[in-house]
Amino acid sequence: MSQIKGKNTKPEILVRKFLFANGYRYRLHDKNFPGKPDIVLAKYMTVIFVNGCFWHGHQDCSKFVIPNTRREFWLNKITKNILNDKKNRLSLEQQGWKVLTVWECQLKKDKSIDYILKQIRS
């Protein structure tokens, strides 16, 4: 468990490199925002969370499988993560921010990254 990173994960770095290559500048893990979004694009009033499918309970995803050992512990932990994500998203939206959530499984498809640009520009 100590080897699992919360920041600078491979999916997050992939999104950051893509945004930077397309001319977007951003702040990382800003503690002034609810949930410390992975990427903050202040100019566009947009925050991006790059979520791991397992840790954030991505429904209907093959990467979200609850382990058979300590099942109750994992269900509680993932449920809390989901509730925190919803609370943080609602808080940010009430402050006028556009909130984008990118799932790690979506990054395997090239079109999902282009989707991020469309959402930022809209």
Image: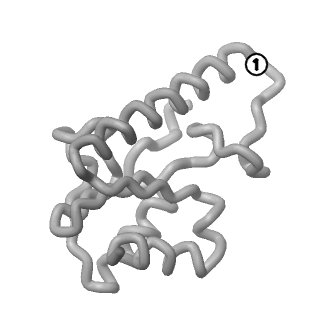
| Residue 100, percent from left and from top | 42, 57
Q: Position of residue 109 (x, y in %)?
A: 65, 75
Counting the numbered discs, the total is 1
Q: Residue at x 58, y 58 (%)?
A: 104
Above or below: residue 71 compared with residue 51: above
Front residue (pair 24, 68): 24
Query: Front-most of 82 and 30?
Result: 82
Q: Position of residue 18 (x, y in %)?
A: 40, 78
The residue pinned by badge 1 equals 71
Relative height, residue 25 to residue 98 (above, below): below
Residue that appears at 37% across and 53% down: 99
How packed is label 1: few (under 14 Cα within 10 Å), some, or many (20 or more)? few
Residue 56 image offset from top left, x and y in percent: 57, 39
Residue 14 in the figure: left or right of residue 94: right
Residue at position x 57%, y 56% in the image:
103
Q: Quadrant of residue 35?
A: top left
In the foreground, 114 or 13: 114
Q: Residue furthest right?
A: 68
Type of the residue with mark 1? Arg
Element on which disc 1 rests? helix
Q: Is residue 10 above or below residue 114?
A: above
The color scheme shown is one colour
What is the quadrant of the N terminus in the image?
top right
> Which residue appears at 57% of the width and 73% of the height?
112
Would residue 99 appear left or right of 24 to someone viewing this image?
right
Quadrant the C terminus occupies: bottom left
| The quarter of the displayed image where residue 8 is located | bottom left
2 to the left or right of 93: right
